[in-house]
Image (cartoon, grey):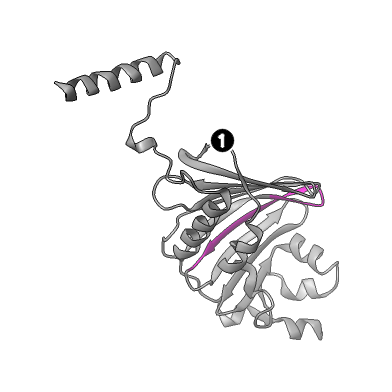
Amino acid sequence: MAANRNLLAAAAACAVAVVGITGCNDDGDKDPFKGMSADKIAQKAIAASKGAGSFKVSGTGDENGKPVKVDFAVAESNDCQGKTGSPTTGTGEIIVVGGTSYIKGDDKFWENATRGSSVGDKIKGRWMKSPDGQQSKTCDKDVMFESTSLKGLKRGKDAEVDGEKAAVLTKKKNGRTLTYYVAMDGKPYFLQIDKKDSDGPAKMSFSDYGSPVTVKAPPAGQVVEQKDLMGS
């Protein structure tokens, strides 16, 4: 009988919650980060996100007052591939394999990147190979999820990101506001990072953690060495 009374009491509490008088929680609504500081939550998110090995990141930023789109897939090996661009700067693609970077762009991309020099004409439709290490940090998970920068955070009101419940961590410094959204169900992955400052807003969304990502270098016949272009 006592157990039945407890069930009835819980049911009554939920019925009251429906009309907005109070709240009702079940085990699925428990806070997995209860008692943790915002910095500690961030450290757990760093470990989980890096530990997943692979993921995708996409979003929008701002460059000189113009919107820029970014879309990347990062492999466990730190190899990656993706593209970035805008209507004003053109679209560029990048592949990083074994620390070597390959860059390819449309006409507008090379016009902006080479400032109208003849180099752009010689590389149209081809990949430019950069010296080893020059661009290799582009998709380095240690750089993306740098723990030293994720300190001094404060936890705000929980939110949802694409239907997933997320803990919200914020950091405000020197006119910049960074907001990190960390998954509360399952592993504490970063779901989204927002930035607001004088350079304009930016938003990056993370997904497909742990899904296989295969990256291959472009065919040799489509590659031009950067040193050869610079010497021409």
Whether residue 146 is visible? no
> How many labels, in total?
1
Judge left or right: residue 130 versus residue 200. left
Q: Which residue in the structure is indicated by mark 1?
A: 157
In the displayed structure, 82 sits above or below 6; it is below
Residue under the image location 42 percent in, 13 percent down: 19
54 or 195: nearer the eye?
A: 195
Q: Main secondary structure of the magenta part?
A: strand
Quick check: 132 above or below 45? below
Amino acid on which the number 1 mark rests in the picture: Lys
Residue 75 visible in the shown view: yes
Find residue 110 and report its horizontal and vertical position in percent. 76, 66
Q: In percent of the image, x 21 and y 19: which residue is there?
A: 5
Quadrant in which the C terminus appears:
bottom right
Quarter of image, res 229: bottom right
What residue lies at 46% left-to-right and 52% top-to-bottom? Answer: 188
Q: Position of residue 11 (x, y in %)?
A: 28, 20
Image quadrant where residue 224 sits: bottom right
Q: Is residue 13 above or below residue 133?
A: above
Locate the N terminus and report the quarter of the image it occupies: top left
Residue 54: percent from left, percent from top: 47, 64
Where is residue 15? Give x, y as percent: 34, 16
- Which image quadrant is residue 125 in? bottom right
Residue most toward the left?
1
Give the magenta-colored segment's residue range.
61-75
